[in-house]
Image: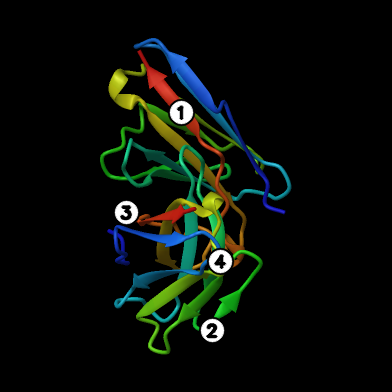
Amino acid sequence: DAKTTQPPSMDCAEGRAANLPCNHSTISGNEYVYWYRQIHSQGPQYIIHGLKNNETNEMASLIITEDRKSSTLILPHATLRDTAVYYCIVSVTGANSKLTFGKGITLSVRP
Amino acid sequence: GAVVSQHPSRVICKSGTSVKIECRSLDFQATTMFWYRQFPKQSLMLMATSNEGSKATYEQGVEKDKFLINHASLTLSTLTVTSAHPEDSSFYICSPTGHRGGLYGYTFGSGTRLTVV
């Protein structure tokens, strides 16, 4: 069972920041927060992951609350190509650690 | 890094025939391979996990004799859907990972759309 809860959908205007929330209140101390997205009929694409510190890369920023029970993925300047299903997943990083996908949040970027 | 090649991207087969899907890790050694499937408008569901040179471990409800997984090398794994039926029509996705697991994030193949007619 997925250990995260996300709203089913949200939208934002092109060029604006998209803030995607995720709750993971039962996260364990050694579990990372991963974000992936899936554009229609493609495999999931890795976005970012973190343990407790905020992280930033060329795609997005990940803000994790101090108690680690929730996080927010920030796409700073959303484009139409960012329209996708975004999955927030918690998992350990061992070689056989599997990712359990929930339903994700559908982000629609409008012109 | 972490380049994955999955083929074919799309296949249509007749009911009762078998279909093989290949997943290659092009620039790293995949010690573990995860196979997922995704039905329309649903999320990804893990089917099985395989380690190179070992038998695959299947998730509950997945028939191991129907979905044959071969992971004989560190760069190639195959999923064969045997005696396919229309209910096996789905989107199949591989995810190879190296010995560090998800330390640098997991990588996924581009998926195979299987349609059984």
- Under mark 4, the amino acid is Ile
Q: CA distance from mark 1 to mark 2?
A: 38 Å
Q: Position of residue B71 (x, y in %)?
A: 56, 38
Subunit under mark 1: B
Looking at the figure, which quarter contains the N terminus of chain B? Answer: bottom right
Residue tagged by mark 4?
A48
| Residue of label 3 | A103
Q: Can residue A26 be spotted in the picture?
A: yes
Is disc 2 on the same chain as disc 1? Answer: no
Q: Is residue B88 above or below residue B39?
A: above
SS at mark 4?
A: strand
Residue under disc 1 on the same chain as residue under disc 4: no
Q: Looking at the rendering, which quadrant does residue A76 occupy?
A: bottom right
Q: Are marks 2 and 3 in contact (CB under 8 Å)?
A: no
Q: Tell me, yes or no, if residue B82 can be seen here.
A: no
Q: Secondary structure at mark 2?
A: loop
CA distance separating discs 4 and 2 = 12 Å
Q: Are marks 4 and 2 in contact (CB under 8 Å)?
A: no
> Residue A53: which numbered mark, if any?
2
| Residue type beneath disc 2 | Asn
Q: Tell me if residue A90 comes above or below residue B42 in the rendering.
A: below
Position of B69 compared to B77: left or right?
left
Q: Which residue, given by chain and number where applicable, does mark 1 sit on?
A: B113
Which chain is disc 3 placed on?
A
Residue A35 to residue A51: above or below: above
Residue drawn 30% across the image and 76% down it: A26
Q: Is residue A41 left or right of residue B101?
A: left
Distance from label 2 to label 3 (Cα)?
25 Å
- Lower sequence index among marks 4 and 2: 4
